[in-house]
Image (cartoon, grey):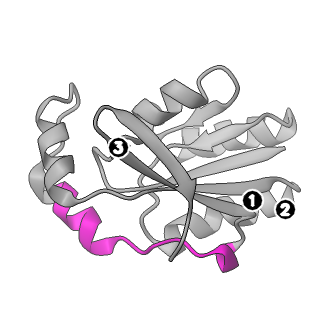
Amino acid sequence: MEMIIFIGIPASGKSSFYKELFFNSHIRISMDLLNTRNKEGKLLQYCFETQSKMVVDNTNVTKEGRKKYIELALQNKYEIIGYYFDSNIQDCMERNKSRKDFINEIGIKAKYKELEKPLIEEGFSKIFNVKIVGQKFEINDYEI
């Protein structure tokens, strides 16, 4: 089974990427949708019990924040794949202006300051780099 973890600041394209690539194959774990950690925990547990493929569509900007998902995935014998959304803050601020669920500029800047690039050593099987080029997602192997 597979757990995908998205890593990126707000408005970097994570949810759009999910809809484009994983909507028909993976359950979406998102605090934007679930609102509480309790609901998130129940959905994660359900996914593990049913051996469902899932995408953790949160910012996951810190190593510590990713750790709980990685530990649960490893306990449940899941492969863990990371997608790092490589974006600059100006592009995200611009995209944020056209979002339905607009995020405060301070929130975007705060997540950008917290951002820790993912490392294979955290428990990932592989990590991909995602960039928005024009209006399309460009996916490449991740390099630090």
Is 92 magenta? The answer is no
**Contact, CB < 8 Å: mark 3 with mark 1?**
no
Instruction: Find numbered disc 1 in the image and state the secondary structure of the residue it sits on.
Output: helix
Q: What stretch is highlighted in magenta?
A: 107-122
**Quadrant, the N terminus:** top right
- The reply to whether residue 6 is visible in this rendering is yes
Amino acid type, residue under disc 3 in the picture: Ile
Mark 2 and mark 3 lie on one chain; the one further toward the N terminus is 2
- Would you place residue 60 above or below residue 63 in this image? above
Q: How crowded is mark 1: few (under 14 residues within 10 Å), some or many (20 or more)?
A: some
| Image location (x, y in percent) of residue 67 | 61, 69
- Would you place residue 143 above or below residue 60 in this image? below
Amino acid type, residue under disc 2 in the picture: Gln
Mark 3 and mark 1 lie on one chain; the one further toward the N terminus is 1
Task: Give the residue drawn at x 61%, y 41%.
Answer: 55
Instruction: Find numbered disc 3 in the image and state the secondary structure of the residue it sits on.
Output: strand
| Image location (x, y in percent) of residue 98 | 15, 29
Amino acid type, residue under disc 1 in the picture: Leu
Cα gap from disc 2 to disc 1, whole angstroms = 5 Å
Total numbered badges shown on the rendered structure = 3
| Image location (x, y in percent) of residue 50 | 85, 32
Q: Is residue 84 left or right of residue 3?
A: left
Instruction: Find numbered disc 2 in the image and state the secondary structure of the residue it sits on.
Output: helix
Task: Give the residue drawn at x 75%, y 63%.
Answer: 125
Write down the residue under mark 1: 72
- The reply to whether residue 35 is visible in this rendering is no
- Would you place residue 28 above or below residue 79 in this image? above
Write down the residue under mark 2: 75
